[in-house]
Amino acid sequence: MTAGMATEIHPAPFLLLFRNGGIEAHRHLTRDERAQLARRWNDWYEGLAARGKVQHGQPLELHGRVVSGPRGEKVTDGPYAEAKEVVAGYLYLSVADLDEATEIARGCPGLPLGLTVEVRPVAAVSPVLNEVCGRPPAAAERAG
């Protein structure tokens, strides 16, 4: 590369998964504290959106179903809001790399309440199937 030329950075997709301690993590907050927390979340999201870093994101309802078993034969109500590892929501980011996605996660307004943020790159194709099929990474990328 010639000196002085800017390096073009292609954004990569990352997912932030928010996991919380359930409703109990927020129960101790006063009405004003809940309102302040909501404003911090909105400001954080809007700031990311204004910079083109977040594509979309949503909180998730507290109820749903869990499907398991080899043929999906086991269906149970859940996950439960009381569970500590419930996925509470997500953000789909478009950023330079894992470091930038991690730095964004570190600014999450829910961290002081015990919420955790899982930072994951979004794969173009399944890395598990690539491994099982024996496809090299370059071939796997072309297949997507």
Image (cartoon, grey):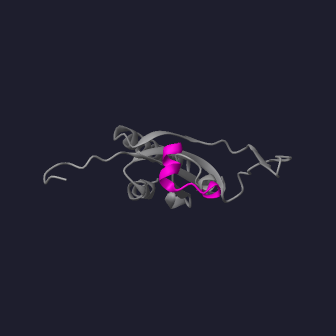
Q: Residue at x 35, y 38 (%)?
A: 50
Please state which of residues 44 and 93 is positioned toward the viewer in this rendering: 93
Q: Give the residue drawn at x 39%, y 39%.
A: 49
Image coordinates of residue 32 in percent, x first then y, are: 50, 47
Is residue 65 one of those drawn in magenta? no
Q: Does the magenta-highlighted stretch encompass residue 134? A: yes
Q: Position of residue 64 (x, y in %)?
A: 74, 43
Q: Is residue 7 visible?
A: yes
Closest to the observer, 59 or 124:
124
Residue 101 lies in what quarter of the image?
bottom left
Q: Main secondary structure of the magenta part?
A: helix
Name the residue rendered at 67%, 60% in the picture.
84
Q: Is residue 26 above or below residue 38?
A: below
Magenta residues, start to end = 131-144
42 or 54, nearer to the observer: 54
Number of numbered discs overlaid on the protein picture: 0
Q: Where residue 67 sits: x, y (%)?
A: 78, 47
Is residue 33 at all visible to an observer of this figure?
no
